[in-house]
Amino acid sequence: MTDKITLTEAEWREKLSPEQYHVLREAGTERAFTGKYDKTDQDGTYFCAGCGAPLFTNADKYNSGCGWPAYSAPVDESAVEVRRDMSHGMVRVEVLCARCEGHLGHVFPDGPAPTGLRYCINSASLDFAPEDEE
């Protein structure tokens, strides 16, 4: 992974849309089944909307039915970081971009083989590049 990206909150607000800022910088979430990448099945790569780091590929994307894009693994283990999230009266594992520490979503141990993981990720935290445009 490349060097960390650190911006001021004012710089993040200027760079991101209000929805992207809410998700990436305030650990918000979009409503289920409303994200633009929930149903995307085109080959390509998903990048962090905050810093452009590659995070996931369509090869690891699957329809979990959860209402958010779901992936069985990141593009590389060093692409994301995880930490314990005890917000909203629950204990979950938060997924962050390793480069800019933007909130992406959460990971759950109910995914398909071989990882058994479901990375449940907000579309607002992602940009997508189809394989033919990468």
Image (tube, grey):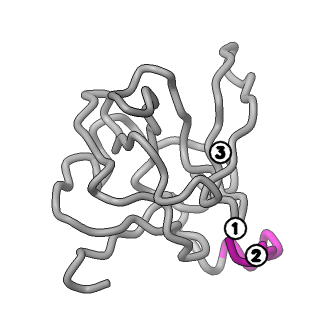
The amino acid on which the numbered mark 3 sits, given as a three-letter code, is: Ala
Kindly identify which residue carries mark 1: 99
Label 2 or label 3, whichever lies nearer to me, is 2
The location of residue 110, given as percent across then percent down, is 42, 20
- Nearer-N-terminus badge (3/1): 3
Front in this rendered view, residue 109 or 84: 109
Instruction: Check the image and report above or below for 64 versus 6.
Output: above
The location of residue 83, given as percent across then percent down, is 74, 37
Labels 2 and 1 touching (C-beta < 8 A)? yes
The amino acid on which the numbered mark 1 sits, given as a three-letter code, is: Arg
Q: CA distance from mark 2 to mark 3?
A: 17 Å
Kindly identify which residue carries mark 3: 27
Q: Main secondary structure of the magenta part?
A: loop
Instruction: Check the image and report above or below for 10 versus 67.
Output: below
Q: CA distance from mark 2 to mark 1?
A: 6 Å
Element type at mark 3: loop
Q: Residue at x 69, y 60 (%)?
A: 98
> Which residues, given as a range, are shown in magenta?
1-13
Residue 131 position by quadrant: bottom left
Q: Residue at x 44, y 33 (%)?
A: 115
Q: Residues within 10 Å of mark 1 (few under 14, many from 20)?
A: many
Kindly identify which residue carries mark 2: 5
